Amino acid sequence: MKKSVFFGAMTVAGLAAGAAAAATLDDVKSRGKLNCGVSTGLTGFSAPDANGEWQGFDVAVCRAVAAAVLGDASAVEFVPTTGKTRFTALASGEIDMLARNTTWTFSRDVDLKFDFVGVNYYDGQGFMVPKELGVTSAKELDGATVCIQTGTTTELNLADFFRVNNISYEPVPIETNAEAQQQYLAGSCDVYTTDASGLAATRATFDAPDAHVLLPEIISKEPLGPLVRHGDNGWGDVVRWTMNALVAAEELGITSANLAEMAAGTNNPEINRLLGSEGTLGEMLGLDADFGAKAIAAGGNYGEVFAKNIGEDTPIGLARGLNALWTEGGLQYAPPFR
Ligand SMILES: N[C@@H](CCC(=O)N[C@@H](CS)C(=O)NCC(=O)O)C(=O)O
């Protein structure tokens, strides 16, 4: 008797999970728009330009998914979220996915019940100080006031780092990067700490970037990537394989310039499966055969998205480093398209 009740409950739970899994893809298709959670503004990652158009490395993930699902890279409602509000926005269904320099951690996966679908930027936490302070190491920061965004891994790593080094600090809690920038430049805190990519992006917007230095210590691992609700596996697959399509495209030499030509068919079967001239990969996801080609058309392959938004030729000036392809000594690696 007990057993059948248990199985009954399992079936209902199973059905609910199945329904939820199908729901987001169906919702996005019937709405004709992707609700994508981003930050409130971090130049190079996600910020509106002078025309009010959202631009950036994380924005590009939203656009690629909209293109793959809806055939339109502009069919995105960008929903600004802070470090604190982002998880509620996703859990409540206000957004379909979050692409906001968010670190993949155990508790966000297991306890908050999200699924990280990959890592679009391997990062770590750093420190920025005004050059005039003459500080050369984070270990010299005993007694410093530190601007720190609430609801982030940054807050927790900072506490760990100071504890391990037996030094103290005074936190100046802030909600957004804009506020951090303002407080830091006004001298309300001696130090700003966040993901090193965020520091580079923030410093690039200063009037005098050279007056500020990034200290050598990187005190954590911050694998940043897009996430969806747990139990929404079909939708998770869509976002995951859209991201993988951009990385695979770079590895296979598919670029914005040669995409149209390659999509017509090549003598490389994996390129053909990825771009949809062979096989049924799109159909397996509930998408069109050319979902990969549409995703790549949105902003180019992973390397092109990186170079355009945050790369060495932009004011942010980030090197590929860990985010180079695995074939170039980095960690970016897409599983096979077959
Ligand atoms: N990766 C860390 C920190 C993410 C974070 O919130 N970073 C800040 C500073 S770079 C940010 O994105 N701010 C943008 C905003 O305030 O909207 C986390 O997931 O907790």
Image (cartoon, rainbow, N blue to C red):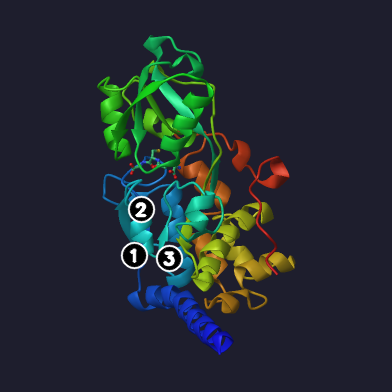
Q: Nearer the viewer, mark 3 or mark 2?
A: 2
Q: Earlier in the sequence, mark 1 or mark 3?
A: 3
- Tell me the residue at 49%/13% (across/down): 136
Q: Residues within 10 Å of mark 3 (few under 14, many from 20)?
A: many
Residue type pointed to by label 3: Ala
> Which residue corresponds to mark 3?
66
> Which residue corresponds to mark 2?
86
Residue type pointed to by label 2: Arg
Q: Residues within 10 Å of mark 2 (few under 14, many from 20)?
A: many
| Residue 40 image point, x, y percent | 31, 46
Q: Quadrant of residue 179?
A: top left
Q: Nearer the viewer, residue 228 or 164?
A: 164
- Tell me the residue at 45%/25% (across/down): 127
Note whether 5 is above or below 46 in the view shown.
below
Q: Nearer the viewer, residue 53 or 224?
A: 224
Give the SS element for disc 3.
helix
| Residue 118 image point, x, y percent | 56, 55
Q: Quadrant of residue 150?
A: top left
| Residue 76 image point, x, y percent | 35, 63
Q: Are marks 2 and 1 in contact (CB under 8 Å)?
A: no
- Tell me the residue at 26%/27% (across/down): 183
> Which residue corresponds to mark 1?
92
